Image (cartoon, rainbow, N blue to C red):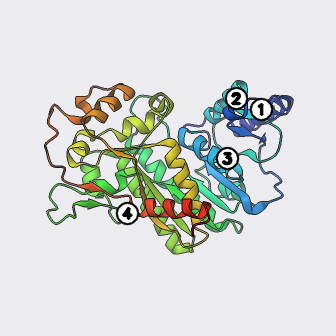
Amino acid sequence: MGILGSEESMRVELEELRRMLVACAGLQRRKDEEQFKGVRVSSMGMDIDDADKLVCVTSGVSYLGLAIVNKLLVGGYSVRIIVENQEDINKLREMESSGEMMTGNNNLSAVMAKLTEIESLTEAFQGCRGVLHTSAFTDPAGLSGYTKSMAEIEVKACENVMRACARTPSVRKCVLTSSLLACVWRGNNQCDLSPVVNDDCWSDVSFCTEKKLWYSLGKLRAEKAAWRVAKETGLKLATICPALVTGPEFCPRNPTATIAYLKGAQEMYANGTLATVGVSKLAAAEACVYEAMDKNAGGRYICFDDVVDRDRAEKLAREAGVPTNKICGNSDSEDVQARFRLSNDKLSTLMSRTLRCCYGEC
């Protein structure tokens, strides 16, 4: 999360990018290739006629963030994304240059804010009816995946986002992207554990610390901090706990989270808790939960597509660029009974009900 350059220089860069986007206002692409329309980048703020449809997405230029932004735009929302550092600005430049971002209307904007500063976030959230905190963090060195210090940063950043949401009068709800890893690491010495891992399950802090599962610990503690703040302030909160996020070029485009998630993969594979979810499916789930919170949706939602078996382990290893035995060990047997069974029944029921309503069946 290292911030390169001064805040003033980043504001200048953003203004330059804004002018570039305006200059490219006439560009068009085929509709089926179009991902973003109406981008307007500014140092802070935007004017939106339909304020009830304005949503803020943190880490909006991350692998998951982009998918969520696209899903919300398709759903008719206006989206404001958080730009925090030079890397985010560079990503915006790349998307502008490649044509991923197009001008034409005002349904997408970017504002600069720091996850380390509640005041900065509160200003960025002004006018938004909701916030989706995707909590995407990268290793500045690009090597270690996710460190203990990054876990501490993630917890504090998450708490800041929640408190900023609670302090912003316009914000009515928040969706936090946690992780399935915040549910599955429950220790080996607890014999009375239910064989079903569902939305009520929490990983064990001591176990994660002992095994140095920093990514799991960061997600676990960040989610617990979010729920603590929500309880204190009355913030309407829902959390989504996704499996390993996959999709087109997921490892090179999302290396930190991928590398960090796979720490402990062999044990998860043996326990039946190593799973994946497509980035598009996860984005759809985020949007579905966000909308359903206007009714009675809330709490935690486990999100996954497939539990990894031997064939999927081999494919995952190829895509992640790691040896197969780093994921499923050296055993070739499929006869070993998994200790646990993952359940995403709560989310599946919600999304099925939402789909039926789209066809007028509810």
Residue position marked by numbered label 3 in the rendering = 81
Q: Could you give the CA–CA distance between mark 2 and mark 4, rounded to whole angstroms?
A: 39 Å
Instruction: Please tell me how many numbered marks the rendered image carries.
Output: 4
Q: Distance of mark 1 from mark 3, alpha carbons?
A: 15 Å
Q: Secondary structure at mark 3?
A: strand
Question: Does residue 349 appear in the picture of this structure?
Answer: yes
Name the residue rendered at 72%, 34% in the picture: 31
Q: Which residue is mark 1?
A: 17
Residue 350 point in image, percent of width and height:
49, 63
**Label 1–label 2 contact, CB within 8 A:** yes
Which of the marked residues, 3 or 4, is nearer the chain's N terminus?
A: 3
Which residue lies at the image location 17% right of the left edge and 54% below the top edge? 188
**Residue beneath disc 2:** 93
Residue 333 in percent (x, y) is at 14, 36
Count neighbours of disc 1 (C-alpha within 10 A) and say few if under 14, some if 14 to 19, many if 20 or more. Answer: many
* Of the pair 331 and 154, the residue shown nearer to us: 331
Disc nearer the start of the sequence (1/4): 1
As shown in the figure, which amino acid type bears the numbered disc 2? Answer: Arg
